[in-house]
Image (cartoon, grey):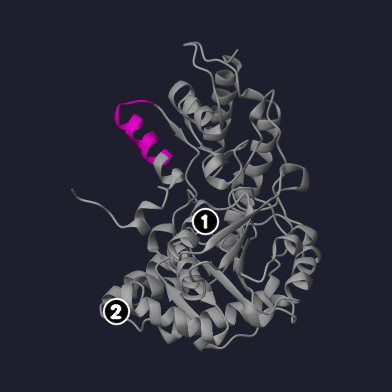
């Protein structure tokens, strides 16, 4: 009998991708589904970035690139970090990968071994805990509920650290909650971590450019921990380039070298044409980034208002990314018209898909079983109609 490895058997499938697939299946049957499950901008890649890719093809960028990326792209990332974030890095500290997802996984596989503990604040992006499993590490989850804006405190962090703690994963702006850590909040966490020099800090900043507080803050700004911070970022969200697959890390030299070694054995360098497009994204005009950010902020204000008009939903006001993450446990235990009892957020999300034709994602996969994630990366018209359907569909529960 065919049997997959124990390593693969331990992993859970991606619930976000599963819900997106189910909504696409309903669409293929001719059902009008509004998909609020996917985590990608609905904008097209800006024209000057596409033009750079077209030029790269004409200029025959069709050969293998260096494993860690072209020097020109790594230099552009170094300049971006200096100009936008006031952070100093060298090109050899930058490793470009096939999306920020690979960047995160590279780091975890490079520093986490069997039995090592990794602190993961919840709610978390679904893949963090699965990547730690892949590395045979142990997830130590810190829960942060809506009452604390889904952000952990220094006291919670300190209580979770043990001699076996090898890494902590932070995500700001956050997927799935949209929460954003302030400089003061990050300093509080940095001061705790400064006392534990064995801990690597993985800072996922892929939503950096989609924030509504005016300025992105990175934990790498604090000198007492900077030498142990790995910034993860990329072009997917801020430049509407999800399908291009280009992420990167800015890391201590030893971690960059380790990721380069690992990547050299299982994917090599990212797509050559994508790298030239990403270079143009970082070196070209940035008005497109601000235009998209403003659109997301307008949509955020809209969906927070619409969601708060729905009885039973507890909704905070996220400061970044393009998600809302309301508590929905008010509806647990209620019955559908067919008599089925809604037991959890996953079943509620499936009910909204099948009955209301709105796709969202239950919070269990994010470590928050009382919540549901709605993405607002779609048009205002779609959002108004979607939340109208959600309100009507939930009202049918008894």
Decide: is 346 above or below 105: above
Residue appearing at x 51%, y 71% in the figure: 112
Q: Which residue is mark 1?
A: 129
- Main secondary structure type of the part rendered in magenta: helix
Label 1 to label 2, Cα distance in Å?
36 Å
Mark in front: 1 vs 2: 1
Residue at the left extreme of this rendering:
1
Residue 75 drawn at (x, y percent)? 51, 85
- The local secondary structure at tag 2 comes to loop
Per the rendered image, the range of residues in magenta is 19-31
Residue 289 drawn at (x, y percent)? 57, 61
Decide: is 357 above or below 79: above
Question: If the image is split into quadrants, where does the C terminus sit?
Answer: top right
Snapshot quadrant of residue 204: bottom right
> Is residue 49 within the magenta segment?
no
Q: Earlier in the sequence, mark 1 or mark 2?
A: 2
Q: Is residue 319 visible?
A: yes
Residue 381 drawn at (x, y percent)? 54, 33
Residue 101 drawn at (x, y percent)? 46, 62
Residue appearing at x 34%, y 80% in the figure: 264
Residue appearing at x 56%, y 25% in the figure: 390
User: Dot 1, crowdedness within 10 Å: few (<14), some or many (≥20)?
Assistant: many
Snapshot quadrant of residue 334: top right
**Most foreground residue, 223 or 84:** 223
**Mark 1 near mark 2, Cβ–Cβ under 8 Å?**
no
Decide: is 92 above or below 366: below
Q: Which residue is mark 2?
A: 61
Image side of residue 21 versus residue 152, left or right: left
């Amino acid at each position: 009998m065919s049997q997959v490895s124990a390593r693969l058997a331990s992993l859970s499938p991606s619930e976000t991708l599963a819900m997106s697939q189910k909504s696409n299946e309903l669409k293929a049957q001719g059902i009008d589904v509004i998909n609020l499950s996917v985590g990608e901008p609905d904008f097209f890649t800006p024209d000057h970035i596409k033009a750079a890719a077209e030029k790269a093809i004409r200029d025959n960028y069709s050969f293998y690139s260096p494993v860690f990326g072209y020097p020109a792209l790594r230099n552009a990332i170094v300049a971006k970090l200096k100009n936008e974030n006031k952070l100093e890095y060298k090109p050899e500290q930058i490793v470009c990968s096939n999306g920020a997802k690979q960047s995160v996984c590279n780091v975890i596989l490079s520093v986490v071994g069997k039995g090592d503990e990794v602190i993961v604040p919840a709610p978390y992006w679904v893949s963090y805990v699965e990547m730690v499993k892949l590395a045979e590490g142990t997830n130590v989850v810190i829960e942060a509920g809506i009452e604390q804006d889904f952000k952990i405190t220094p006291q919670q962090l300190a209580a979770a650290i043990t001699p076996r703690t090898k890494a902590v994963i932070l995500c700001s702006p956050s997927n799935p909650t949209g929460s954003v850590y302030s400089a003061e909040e990050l300093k509080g966490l940095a001061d705790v971590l400064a006392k534990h020099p064995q801990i690597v800090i993985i800072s996922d900043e892929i939503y950096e450019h989609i924030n509504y507080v005016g300025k992105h803050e990175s934990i790498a700004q604090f000198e007492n921990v900077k030498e142990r911070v790995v910034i993860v970022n990329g072009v997917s969200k801020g430049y509407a380039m999800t399908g291009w697959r280009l992420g990167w890390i800015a890391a201590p030299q030893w971690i960059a070298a380790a990721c380069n070694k690992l990547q050299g054995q299982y994917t090599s360098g990212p797509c050559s044409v994508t790298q030239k497009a990403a270079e143009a994204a970082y070196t070209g005009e940035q008005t497109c980034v601000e235009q998209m950010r403003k659109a997301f902020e307008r949509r955020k204000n809209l969906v927070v208002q619409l969601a708060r008009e729905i009885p039973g939903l507890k909704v905070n006001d996220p400061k970044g990314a393009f998600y809302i993450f309301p508590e929905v446990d008010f509806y647990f235990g209620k019955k559908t018209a067919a008599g089925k009892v809604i037991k959890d957020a996953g079943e509620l999300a499936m009910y909204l898909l099948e009955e209301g034709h709105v796709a969202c994602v239950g919070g269990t996969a994010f470590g928050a079983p009382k919540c549901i994630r709605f993405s607002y990366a779609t048009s205002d018209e779609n959002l108004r109609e979607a939340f109208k359907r959600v309100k009507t569909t939930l009202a049918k529960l008894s």
